[in-house]
Amino acid sequence: MIPRIHQQGSNTLGLLHYLYGKGTHEEHIDPHLVASFDGMAPDPGRDPSVTKRDLQHLLDQPLALLAPDLRPDKHVWHCSVRAAPDDPILSDEQWGDIARRMVAATGIDPGDGAGCRWAAVRHADDHIHIIATLVREDGRRPDHHRSGKRAQAECRLIEKELGLHQVAPGDGTAAKRATSAERHKAERQGRERPAREELRETVRRAVAGATREEEFFARLAAAGLLIRKRVAPSGDLLGYKVALPDDRNGENEPVYYTGSTLAADLSLPRIRERWTLPAEAAASADGSRPEQPVLPDVTGPAFARRRATAATWQALLIIDHGDDGAAAAQIAAAGEVLDALAKTSAAHTRAELREAAFVFERASRSHVKAVRGHDRALRQAARDLVHSGPALGRGEDGATTAMLIDMAFFLAAAAANWHAKKHHSQQAAAAQQAAEHLRTAYQAAAAESMAVLHQRGQRLAPRARQRQADLLHEVLPDLAARVQAEPGWPALAATRFSRSLMPPPTPLL
């Protein structure tokens, strides 16, 4: 259950017109009152004998207790409370109880008999709006300091008591959620996701592995987005806006979103941080040795995946043993690798990889500042993946893709564990959810490769097959018989045989 305290206003009647109207996109259905400060406020939604102005007069009467020069400029308090998509539909009585608890918890009407006047309007199954006048019956101002955090705490209690989806407590670093109007608009247009979320995903993919502004904006243009740049009189670029070509407002104009409104780390200044190497990041996480130079770009998709796997393995070690700034940088860069992997994935893994990247985005930000520079290897890996393109059908049997997805799974699990230790509940949950999507993607990616390896293992010459069995008995004498009885033994034997024929690998670092 998500409460949201909206910006204070000065027009009670205007807000009532919105709450009782059809909505920006006609998403308001049967608007009506579910609770009020005295339980007897007029309901212009279901009582044809009263008007919205009648309700406005009742709510604003306490303003008359104050001299005109003492009345607050912005006296309208507005709070919305939304249930989770998978929650059951609550009754009007339940929403009324929730409204009373919310105004009590936030200090709007604490139950002392002289609280503010308020009304709760329901115009959809999954949420209510509470409107209040910020002057108490005794003429004093209410104590609603930190009302947002108090509303969040009360919602956590309500979720437990009503058996609703329990939302992990946030820390203010999450990207702004799509509004109700944006979601309804997406449904009408047949979009998979609201425009805000589509744009956020597209911009994230454009950032993945990019090294300069020209490349970033070229990727945005190649993705089909409309772009507006904000330029200072000096000619310096200050920011940008993006829009989907077919997402229009009532005047048939494109609806633009600034990078910062898509996510805090997608503003131009924050994106630029990824392209700079601070002096303090020139050393490794423990400060013992300088950072290794980044190898040049590669073009082979299989090799790009192998190198990304190696970079991911090193990121795991840094998350486990490095300082907080270095670990946060690795987790943030891991999101770029997932975006790049989803962008270049084959059809049978694309959906799960895209979902993994989508949910991991929440895990990539916290109040722990990422020390850029430590993430160069992962960001280079993301760049290699993007530039090498899809692997399937280009001399790659899917094994290296499965290998990278497997390592990405462990990286997501490590990120979940790191966030959990820091008590970052939402980030830990997001990383764990991404790990589950990666697990499913790995199963799809590995199935074909395992079948090919199984066939190769069955075709091994008897001498080669015996050599692998002898090696297995030498290394794992107690488990050798059990391993050979497993269905995957031919594939394992083929893998070991293939590696025995390969020259020693060239170190990547």
Image (cartoon, rainbow, N blue to C red):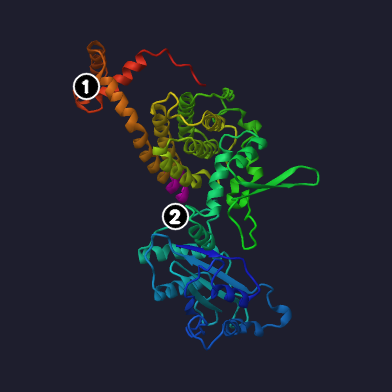
Q: Amino acid under label 2?
A: Ala
The image quadrant of residue 155 is: bottom left
Residue lying at the far bottom in this picture: please name it: 49
Tell me the element at label 1. helix
Magenta stretch secondary structure, dominant: helix
Residue lying at the far right in this picture: please name it: 234
Residue lying at the far top in this picture: please name it: 463
Whole-percent x, y for residue 375 in the image:
55, 33
Whether residue 141 is situated above or below residue 196 in the rendered picture: below
Residue 86 falls left or right of residue 113: left
Measure how far apart labels 2 and 1 are at the Cα level.
Answer: 45 Å
Mark number displayed over residue 168 = 2
Whole-percent x, y for residue 73 in the image:
69, 73
Mark number displayed over residue 480 = 1
Q: 74 or 109, which lies in front?
A: 74
Q: Amino acid under label 1?
A: Ala
Whether residue 145 is situated above or below residue 451 in the rendered picture: below
Do the residues bearing badges 2 and 1 touch, measured as CB atoms within 8 Å? Answer: no
Whole-percent x, y for residue 236 in the image:
76, 42
Residue 428 within the magenta-colored segment of the rendering: yes
The image quadrant of residue 70 is: bottom right
| Residue 175 visible in the displayed image | no
Mark toward the start of the polypeptide (2 vs 1) = 2
Tell me the element at label 2. loop
Give the residue drawn at x 62%, y 69%.
Answer: 8
Whole-percent x, y for residue 64 in the image:
66, 85
- The stretch in magenta equals 419-431
